Every structure is written in structure tokens, then in C-alpha cells.
Amino acid sequence: MKVQHRFKVLTDAIVEGADVRGLDSDAVGPFTLELRYKGPLRGPFTMSDDPEYEHYRWVIDRRSKVQMMLLRLYKLVRTPAPAEDQAYRDRLIDDFIAAAFSLWRAIFLVDQARDAKSVQQAHERFLRTVISTNTVTFSDDRNTSSWSATYYLENASHRCDAAMEQIVKHNPESEKYFSQFGNMDVEPNHGILVLRRGWDGTFGMLDRCVSVFDGSYDPEKEHKLRIIKAPTPTEHG
């Protein structure tokens, strides 16, 4: 099951606490969006007076979420499983851990806007570092974040997609729980806000996969959808 999940719309709009779902990559405003509400909207579609503070607040919040996910996976790893499910379980847990690690790493790399030129420069810088030092550190990831941020985000998305397909194959009835998720598709001209949405959408996919796998997912507890009208380009610049 492959459902493309694109993030080309509302590049300049902040919907704080909301998770954007299934946007059409060719959409042109004005248009209507479905948002899965997760908390109070903060000054709809307004830019923060202190972007650095807002970014750190976002980083700390998401770091907490992904660390709790890692702890959740740690408990799952330590829980015995029936022998007949071991291979299926091991493969899923491998995907879960890979996705969670990639999301953890990506949190610290989405503070720079990216365009085609910065991505090309990051390509060259990354290759030069690997060739000349035969090693890559977190500092190198930071120095090439125009490329490395999406490397980790897309790796997490692909791992979640692989896990999702395994879960559905094992239990076809579970496919209905994944209808709004799919692979991330980030293009070179995407800014910080779009990368954040990419992170949030991919983390949501991972959380859904783990919850469906361990039996904790309850569709009845899903937040209600709210319909809002997105601003036209003239309304948010």
C-alpha cells in the first residue's frame, strides 16, 4: 500500500499543534484542508515574534516525544513473544528502531531552509568529508543539514512504510488504520516549516504502526477532524 504524502502546500503557514493530512501537491488556494486537531491553535497562520525560541520549543517537544517512543520500543524489545511470531516481530522492531533513531537525529537538523543550491553544496561537502576523513560525525550532519535532514526524514518514512506493509500483510483488517499515511516526498526548495510537518507526519506514522502492532491503538480515541479554510497567498504573504 503506497499513499504519497506530500508537503508542498502552506509553506508559509504555521498551524501550531495540528497535523496536516493528505495534501494535494498541485493544490492552489484558496482551498479547504482537513486537520487532525491535537491542541489549541496558536494565532492561526501567523509567524512567531521570536523564531529561535519557537524552534527550540519545537525541538524540545519533539525530542521528548521521540525519546518516549524509544523507551516504548525498549520495553517492547524486552517483552517475550510467541515463537511463531518471532520473525515477524523482529523485522517490525528493526524498522521501528531505525525510524525512531532517524527521527531523533532529524530533530536537530531541520533548523535551516533548503534550496537546490544548498543541497548541491551539501552533497559536495558530505562527499569531501567522507573521502578525506573516512568518518562522519553529528557535526558533519549539521554542516550538511540541507541534505542530511531529509536523508533521515525519508529513511524514517521508508522504514515506517515497510513496517506498515508488513502489518497489513500479517493482518489485512488493519489496512483501514493507515489510509492517511504514506511516503514522505520533500523537494529541494522546502523550508523549515515544511520539514517540521514532514517530521510530525512521519512520527505520527511510526506511532500508528507501533500502536497497531502492540494492540494499543483505539480508533475511538482519535481526535475529531476540524475543517478550516486555508488563507490565500495574499492573506499570508
Image (cartoon, rainbow, N blue to C red):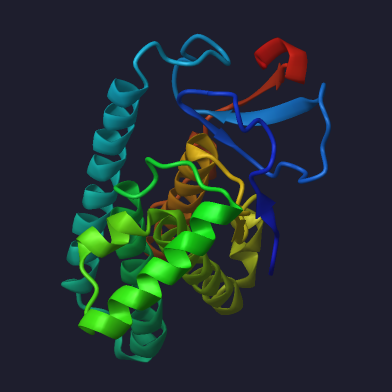
Asked whether the viewer can see residue 149, the reply is yes
Residue pictured at 62% horizontal, 33% vertical: 11
Nearer to us in this view, 96 or 117: 117
Residue 44 appears at what percent x and percent y? 56, 12
Residue 163 appears at what percent x and percent y? 49, 72
Q: Quadrant of the N terminus?
A: bottom right
Nearer to us in this view, 79 or 142: 142
Residue pictured at 39% horizontal, 11% vertical: 49
Residue 65 appears at what percent x and percent y? 29, 43
Q: In this view, does 116 lie to the left or right of 153?
A: right
Q: In this view, does 43 lie to the left or right of 182?
A: left
Q: For residue 70, what is the image quadrant?
A: bottom left
Whether residue 43 is situated above or below residue 98 in the rendered picture? above
Asked whether the viewer can see residue 95, the reply is no
Residue pictured at 72% horizontal, 41% vertical: 23
Q: For residue 60, what is the image quadrant?
A: top left
Number of marks present in the image shown: 0
Nearer to us in this view, 211 or 128: 128
